[in-house]
Image (cartoon, helix red, strand yellow):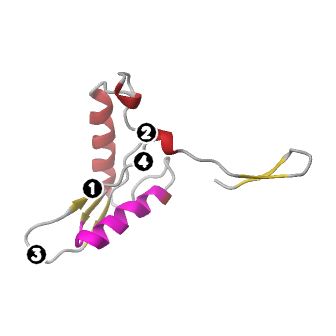
Amino acid sequence: MCIGGDRSSGYAASKLQFLRKTSDTNKNPELAKLEEEITREANDLGIGPMGFGGKTTLLGTKVTAENRVPASFFVSVSYMCWAFRRQGAHITSKGEIKKWFY
């Protein structure tokens, strides 16, 4: 998620949040608190994976902020469905995994 910026820069900044590790903590204490709060409250809703119910709806929330001069702020949200997970590996001719890419 990105708070601020214009429509295109906010969207680009929100997409960059996918590159953060799920275990990291935001360097900005206010945004770190917001990330934790959104994740906790979403998981308390009981929506669960694919909407079938459960305790885990979000694995994590990542928020950044961009500068904005006007009085209104865009909030750009990028989301990644669990079904979009991917993994890559270099596999030798013998079928052994030499290196994981992700």
Amino acid type at circle 4 is Met
Q: CA distance from mark 1 to mark 4?
A: 23 Å
Residue 59: which numbered mark, if any?
Answer: 2
Amino acid type at circle 3 is Pro
Which quarter of the figure is the N terminus placed in?
Answer: bottom left
Residue 80: which numbered mark, if any?
Answer: 4
Q: Is residue 38 above or below residue 15?
A: above
- Magenta range is 4-18
Amino acid type at circle 2 is Leu
Q: Quadrant of residue 8?
A: bottom left
Q: Is residue 78 above or below residue 9?
A: above
Q: CA distance from mark 2 to mark 3?
A: 33 Å
Magenta-colored stretch includes residue 5: yes
Q: Which secondary structure, mark 3? A: loop
Q: Tell me the mark number nearer the camera, choosing from 1 and 4.
A: 4
Percent position of residue 27, x then y: 39, 60
Answer left or right for 48 relative to 6: right
Q: Choose between 82 and 75: the one closer to the eye.
A: 82
Q: CA distance from mark 3 to mark 4?
A: 30 Å
Q: Tell me the mark number nearer the camera, choosing from 2 and 1.
A: 2
